[in-house]
C-alpha cells in the first residue's frame, strides 16, 4: 500500500469534524437562517482539490453523519451532499481556474440546489417546509467561500495533503 497516497488524511478528517461542530453549534434563533453550510463548503473544497480521494462516497458518509447530528430525515443531507459532490467533481478542473468570485457563485448555486432539494424532501413527507430564508444560508456560504478556500488551501499545502 502506498503511504504517500494517504498523506494528510487526518487533515481532511479534522476539517470535516470542525465543520460538523460549526454546523451544530448553538446560535441565536434570529441567526439560524444565516448559518453557512459549513459541511458543504469543506466538501466542495476537497472535491475541487483532491477529487480522487474525496468524492461521492465521502459525501454520502458525511451526509449520514450530519443527518444524525442534526436529527433530520436519514439520507436527506446525504443525498444533497452527494449531488453537490457530483457537480463539483464534474466541474473541478474548470473551478480550479475560476477566480474566487466565480467559484463563490457556483458555491451559491450548489447550496441553493441543496436547499431546494431539502424543501422538496420535506414536502414529500408532509413536514413543514422552509421559506425564502434558505437563500440566506447560501448567500453567507458564498461570502465565506474565499476565506474558507484560503484557509483550507493553506492547511493542505502546510501538511502536504495529496
Image (cartoon, rainbow, N blue to C red):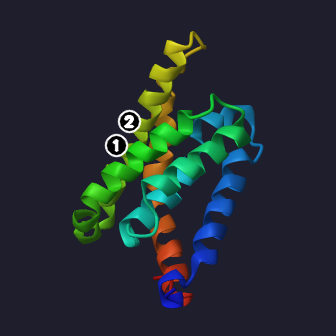
Task: Please state, as top left, top right, bottom left or bottom right, where the C terminus lies in the image.
Answer: bottom left
Q: CA distance from mark 2 to mark 1?
A: 6 Å
Q: Residue 63 has which mark?
A: none
The residue lying toward the viewer, choosing from 141 and 3, is: 3
Helix, strand or loop at label 1? It is helix
Taking the view exactly as shown, the residue that stands out farthest to the right is 26
Task: Sort mark 2 into few (<14), some (14-19) or many (20+) by Cα contacts within 10 Å.
Answer: some
Name the residue nearer the viewer: 73 or 139.
73
Residue 116 horizontal/vertical position (percent): 42, 28
Element type at marker 2?
Answer: helix
Please say if the residues under marks 2 and 1 sit with CB atoms less than 8 Å apart.
Answer: yes
Instruction: Report the disc number at residue 109.
Output: 1
Mark 1: give few (<14), some (14-19) or many (20+) Cα within 10 Å: some
- Residue 151 vertical placement versus 81 (above, below): below
Residue 27, position as x, y percentages in the image: 74, 42
Q: Is residue 66 left or right of residue 99?
A: right
Q: Residue at x 54, y 21 (%)?
A: 130
Task: Name the residue: 47% across, 38% down.
Answer: 79
Q: Position of residue 51 (x, y in %)?
A: 38, 67
The residue lying at 49 percent from left, 88 percent from top is 2
- Rendered residue at 46%/39% (across/down): 80
Picture quadrant where residue 31 is located: top right
Judged from this view, the residue extending furthest toward the front is: 1
Q: Which numbered disc covers residue 113?
A: 2
Amino acid at each position: 500500500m502506498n503511504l504517500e497516497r494517504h498523506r494528510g488524511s487526518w487533515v481532511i478528517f479534522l476539517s470535516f469534524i470542525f465543520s460538523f461542530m460549526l454546523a451544530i453549534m448553538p446560535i441565536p434563533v434570529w441567526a439560524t437562517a444565516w448559518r453557512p453550510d459549513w459541511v458543504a463548503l469543506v466538501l466542495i473544497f476537497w472535491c475541487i482539490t483532491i477529487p480522487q480521494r474525496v468524492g461521492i462516497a465521502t459525501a454520502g458518509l458525511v451526509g449520514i453523519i450530519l443527518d444524525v447530528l442534526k436529527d433530520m430525515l436519514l439520507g436527506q443531507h446525504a443525498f444533497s451532499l452527494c449531488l453537490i459532490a457530483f457537480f463539483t467533481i464534474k466541474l473541478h478542473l474548470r473551478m480550479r481556474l475560476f477566480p474566487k468570485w466565480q467559484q463563490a457563485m457556483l458555491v451559491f448555486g450548489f447550496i441553493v440546489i441543496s436547499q431546494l432539494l431539502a424543501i422538496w424532501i420535506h414536502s414529500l413527507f408532509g413536514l413543514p417546509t422552509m421559506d425564502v430564508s434558505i437563500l440566506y444560508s447560501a448567500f453567507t456560504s458564498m461570502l465565506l467561500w474565499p476565506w474558507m478556500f484560503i484557509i483550507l488551501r493553506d492547511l493542505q499545502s502546510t501538511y502536504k495533503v495529496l
